[in-house]
């Protein structure tokens, strides 16, 4: 699988990375119950397919996602890069909150090192720029940890251009992790051009729109989602946005048929076409799902494909699905 340099780092990452949000299991923003054995098999399948990096976070399942990643890596000879985050903590009752205080960041990284069972974290990312008044303190804390050798490289997630500019003096930003897909393309306007111009790598999350762009999501399936699946509360999964999102899927389906790939792979390939994108994070929950996404690395959309999808995006912005 083709590799690309992540920003100015020495990390050479595959165009697709494995996301582990869903495999964390239940929490406030979880995807419902998950079988750890399925998760481990999915991780092994992804690594066997050539993927060489895993993205996780302490918040995913309140530490459980990192623990599952560690369990999977103990059972394989693969040695992928492991990326995690900081900035979300939780209390004894499992209620998450956000803080970027120095002491909290230091404690989070130590706990991630323990859960992941690694000596150093390849990439540690500030999960959200929240609270805004603590951004400078949090980023400075991450930089101290990088200097101390606890982490190799530092990044940010969900930051705006102004926020990245704000912390450039305190943190050497290797990469940004934003949402980017055909149902959430907003970062194309300002954020991606900024990263490209400033040598900041980009690993986008939710390239399949949290399942909307897989070609398998229907209204019936949405209605049947578990009560503890965060997507039940998302506007993307409710009308009027749902209708426009499903219309985009049908446009993608025609393109996928022409390339003999899955709808999900076509959606991921669209995000990878942007020159600012280093790699896309794809979330899977079982080995079968890996088969339907890993081929995106080899899908090359044509100019005509991109034009058709661009026209559909324009219609979305105009408020029409026709």
Image (cartoon, rainbow, N blue to C red):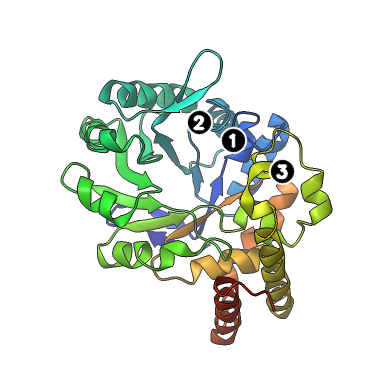
Q: Is mark 2 on a helix, strand or loop?
A: loop
Q: Of residues 114 and 211, which is closer to you in this image?
A: 211
Q: In this view, does 80 lie above or below 296?
A: above
Q: Of residues 224 and 300, which is closer to you in this image?
A: 224
Q: Name the residue under label 1.
A: 29
Residue 286 circle label: 3
In the rendered structure, which disc, 1 or 2, sits on the residue that comes first in sequence?
1
Q: Of residues 26 and 150, which is closer to you in this image?
A: 26
Residue 277: tell me if it is visible: no
In the rendered image, which quarter is residue 29 located in? top right
- Give the side of residue 313 with respect to residue 274, left or right: right
In the rendered structure, which disc, 1 or 3, sits on the residue that comes first in sequence?
1
Question: Do tag 1 and tag 2 residues touch (Cβ < 8 Å)?
Answer: yes
Q: Is residue 56 above or below residue 303?
A: above
Residue at point 41% right, 48% down?
158
Question: Do tag 2 and tag 3 residues touch (Cβ < 8 Å)?
Answer: no
């Amino acid at each position: 699988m083709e590799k690309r340099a992540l920003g100015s780092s020495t990390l050479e990452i595959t165009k697709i990375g494995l996301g582990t949000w869903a495999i964390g299991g239940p929490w406030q923003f979880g995807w419902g119950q998950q079988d750890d054995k399925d998760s481990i098999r999915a991780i092994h399948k992804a690594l066997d397919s050539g993927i060489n990096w895993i993205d996780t976070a302490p918040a995913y399942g309140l530490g459980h996602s990192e623990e599952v990643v560690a369990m999977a890596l103990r059972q394989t000879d693969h040695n992928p890069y492991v990326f995690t985050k900081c900035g979300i903590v939780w209390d004894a009752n499992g209620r998450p909150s956000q803080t970027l205080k120095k002491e909290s960041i230091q404690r989070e990284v130590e706990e991630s090192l323990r859960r992941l069972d690694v000596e150093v974290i390849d990439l540690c990312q500030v999960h959200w720029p929240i609270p805004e008044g603590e951004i400078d303190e949090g980023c400075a804390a991450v930089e101290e940890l990088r200097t101390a050798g606890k982490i190799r490289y530092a990044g940010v997630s969900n930051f705006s251009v102004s926020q990245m500019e704000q912390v450039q003096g305190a943190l050497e930003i290797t990469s940004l992790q934003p949402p980017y897909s055909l149902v959430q393309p907003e970062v194309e306007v300002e954020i991606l051009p900024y990263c490209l111009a400033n040598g900041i790598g980009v690993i986008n999350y939710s390239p399949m729109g949290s399942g909307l762009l897989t070609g398998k999501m229907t209204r019936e399936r949405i209605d049947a989602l578990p009560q503890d699946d965060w997507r039940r509360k998302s506007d993307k999964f409710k009308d009027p946005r749902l209708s426009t999102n499903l219309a985009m899927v049908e446009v993608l389906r025609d393109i996928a048929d022409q390339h003999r790939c899955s709808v999900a792979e076509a959606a991921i390939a669209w995000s990878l076409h942007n020159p600012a994108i280093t790699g896309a994070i794809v979330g899977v929950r079982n080995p079968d799902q890996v088969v339907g996404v890993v081929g995106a690395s080899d899908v090359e959309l044509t100019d005509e494909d991109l034009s058709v999808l661009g026209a559909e995006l324009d219609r979305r912005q105009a408020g029409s699905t026709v």
